[in-house]
Image: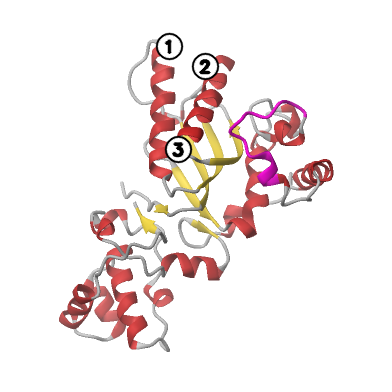
């Protein structure tokens, strides 16, 4: 199976979904759920990850997180690994608790933070488990409203400040915003290509970051082709030669296009494209987006 890209950089913002193996339930009882929240708290602290929203369903869970250190893979490895060990130990089981790799969307924070936060806490309502989000104990909704004590890892203020600069009014606005979204379609239906939810400018900036490093070359080509932009979206007919040459590297190394595919698209000899790619493949140490 082709694995999706992992776009990672300092300050990246994500929606995460993890499902149970063979879509089985990942919680037997409320003790399992309490353990999950406790482990999430510990791992978020140890990996310096900011959690804006979460929701535990029967056979999957949702997170809305930010990674100041650009360490999504390490965070998810720790979280799912410790949760699986705890579950298996408690129930005398072995094997995988979760289904393969987690699914992640890279999100444009300024544009979609509120919508994704709403989507996360409305999952139980959309699934028909409850009529109102406050009736579901296992999400961040009630804590964000101040109805229950907020767990230490939950960044309620960081979310609420998008609704108002004073907490009581922000909570009222948040509650109204969530209530109005029950019949609003998922924001993820707006994604036309792959794994990025954001404005065209944001998508373009992510895919065209100049921070090409040797780490990207370690990815198998099949790991780079899910969610990649079309060659026609990468190359602008009016771009300078300098920009074209750098984009050749991006298309080949980051997005997994064959040199022959790039050459055919540009109307160049494959040998010419190969020389450009090799000559311009210079590591850059700036902490912009990289793929892992």
Sequence-earlier tag: 1 or 2: 2
Which circle, 3 or 1, is nearer the viewer?
A: 3
Q: Residue at x 68, y 46 (%)?
A: 159
Which residue was labeled with disc 3? 47
Sequence-earlier tag: 2 or 3: 2
Q: Residue at x 21, y 75 (%)?
A: 260
Q: Left of 141 or right of it: where is 64? A: left
Q: Is residue 84 magenta?
A: no
Crowding at label 2, few (<14), some or many (≥20) Cα neighbours within 10 Å? few
Q: Left of 52 or right of it: where is 230? A: left
Which residue was labeled with disc 1? 91
Residue 28: which numbered mark, if any? 2
Q: Residue at x 30, y 83 (%)?
A: 266
The residue closer to the viewer here, 149 or 254, is: 149
Crowding at label 1, few (<14), some or many (≥20) Cα neighbours within 10 Å? few
* Cβ–Cβ under 8 Å for marks 1 and 2: yes
Is the magenta region chiefly helix, strand or loop?
A: loop
Q: Secondary structure at mark 1?
A: helix
Which circle, 2 or 3, is nearer the viewer?
A: 3
The residue closer to the viewer here, 17 or 249, is: 249
Dividing the picture into quarters, in which one does residue 279 lie?
bottom left
Dividing the picture into quarters, in which one does residue 190 lie?
bottom right
The residue closer to the viewer here, 67 or 63, is: 67
Sequence-earlier tag: 3 or 1: 3
Magenta-colored span? 147-159
């Amino acid at each position: 199976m082709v694995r999706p890209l992992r776009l990672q950089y300092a300050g990246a913002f994500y929606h995460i979904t993890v499902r149970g193996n063979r879509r089985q339930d990942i919680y037997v009882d409320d003790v399992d759920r309490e353990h999950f929240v406790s482990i999430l708290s510990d791992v978020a602290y140890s990996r310096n990850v900011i959690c804006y929203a979460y929701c535990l369903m029967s056979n999957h869970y949702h997170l809305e997180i930010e990674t100041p250190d650009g360490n999504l893979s390490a965070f998810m490895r720790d979280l799912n690994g410790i949760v699986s060990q705890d579950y298996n130990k408690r129930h005398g089981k072995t094997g995988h608790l979760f289904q393969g790799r987690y699914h992640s969307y890279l999100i444009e924070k300024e544009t979609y933070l509120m919508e994704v936060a709403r989507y996360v806490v409305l999952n139980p309502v959309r699934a028909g488990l409850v009529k109102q989000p406050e009736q579901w104990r296992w999400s961040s909704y009630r804590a964000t409203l101040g109805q229950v004590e907020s767990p230490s890892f939950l960044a309620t203020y960081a979310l609420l400040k998008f609704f108002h600069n004073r907490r009581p009014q922000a909570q009222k606005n948040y509650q109204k915003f969530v209530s109005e979204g029950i019949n609003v379609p998922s924001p993820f239906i707006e994604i036309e290509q792959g794994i990025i939810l954001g404005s065209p400018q944001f998508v373009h900036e992510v895919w065209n970051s100049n921070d090409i490093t040797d780490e990207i070359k370690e990815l198998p080509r099949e790991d780079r082709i899910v969610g990649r932009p079309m060659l026609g979206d990468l190359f602008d007919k009016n771009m300078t030669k300098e920009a074209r040459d750098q984009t050749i590297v991006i298309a080949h190394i980051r997005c997994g296009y064959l040199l022959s595919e790039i050459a055919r698209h540009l109307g160049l000899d494959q040998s010419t494209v190969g020389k450009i790619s090799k000559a311009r493949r210079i590591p850059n140490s700036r902490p912009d987006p990289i793929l892992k």
